[in-house]
Amino acid sequence: MHDLRTVTEQAPAKLNLALHVRHRRPDGYHELETLFAFVEHGDTVRVVPAETDSFTLDGPFAPVLAAEGDNLVTRAATRFREAFGGGAHSIALEKRLPVASGIGGGSADAAATLRALAALHGIAPEDTRLFAIADALGSDVPACLLGRTALGRGRGEQLAPVAGLSGMPVLLVNPGVAVSTAAVFRGWDGVDRGPIGSGDLLDVARGGRNDLEPPARALAPAIDAVLAALAVQEGVLLARMSGSGATCFALFDTQTARDAAAATLAGRDWWLAATRLR
């Protein structure tokens, strides 16, 4: 939503319904096949033209991000101006997603910033230059810029939209630990366990896996307890870790089942978000 001078964009959390690591490439990246999906819960980015650039942070996870210094939002804004012009902007980020948690928080924020700036300056959201900027910012940023269920290949930037499961109830759970994406990839055992299948999205997701789950669990054993707790809840269709962790998700057959699971797990020292697929 936006008026002539302000644009507000949602930055929904990204899920990897399945993530298959096929091989390590000569450039140091890994060749992936992944099913991207997005939920309704996420961060919010607000952009306003200004005399000088400014960036402000708010929300429950703002202190964590502020401590990191450099962030993808300001880098996205800089790259946009280099490509399209547009002058200075005041950018405000409401940070509701945990940092370094496998649900694309920083990537989603960067993508939302690009969408907001594009809307403000009359750039079509499908402009290939936007996706080039997104690709340069990070492997998940193009998927977050597209913002819909898709099969990702390459580093995740080669995207083929697929029919989603809009409205399906989801519970996100993070045990309160941050894990290094680079460390998790280094821990991958190098075994190609085969491609993602084809067909109905839920069946394909359930028949898939997350190859980063074992190394992430080795680095952060707290993930074990989250997955075990999710797996035994009533109405769970799929429970898995997202991305490189440590956030896990469960898809539920009903909202009632999801809410009951959220109530059951709320007593633990975990971050929870009851939401739905977009």
Image (cartoon, rainbow, N blue to C red):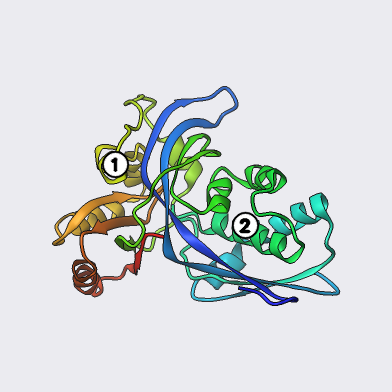
For disc 1, the neighbor class at 10 Å (few under 14, some 14 to 19, many from 20) is few
- Location of the N terminus (image quadrant): bottom right
**Does residue 61 show up?**
yes
Q: Residue at x 25, y 41 (%)?
A: 203
Residue 183 image position (x, y, % from top left)? 46, 41
The residue type indicated by label 2 comes to Ala
In front of the other: 57 or 119: 119
In front of the other: 178 or 109: 109
The residue type indicated by label 1 comes to Asp
- Quick one: which residue is furthest to the top in this view? 26
**Could you say which quadrant of the image residue 271 lies in?**
bottom left
Q: Residue at x 30, y 60 (%)?
A: 168
Residue 215 lies left or right of residue 91; in this view the side is left
User: What is the secondary structure assignment of the residue under circle 1?
Assistant: loop
For disc 2, the neighbor class at 10 Å (few under 14, some 14 to 19, many from 20) is many
In front of the other: 28 or 255: 255
- Location of the C terminus (image quadrant): bottom left
| Badge number at residue 200 | 1
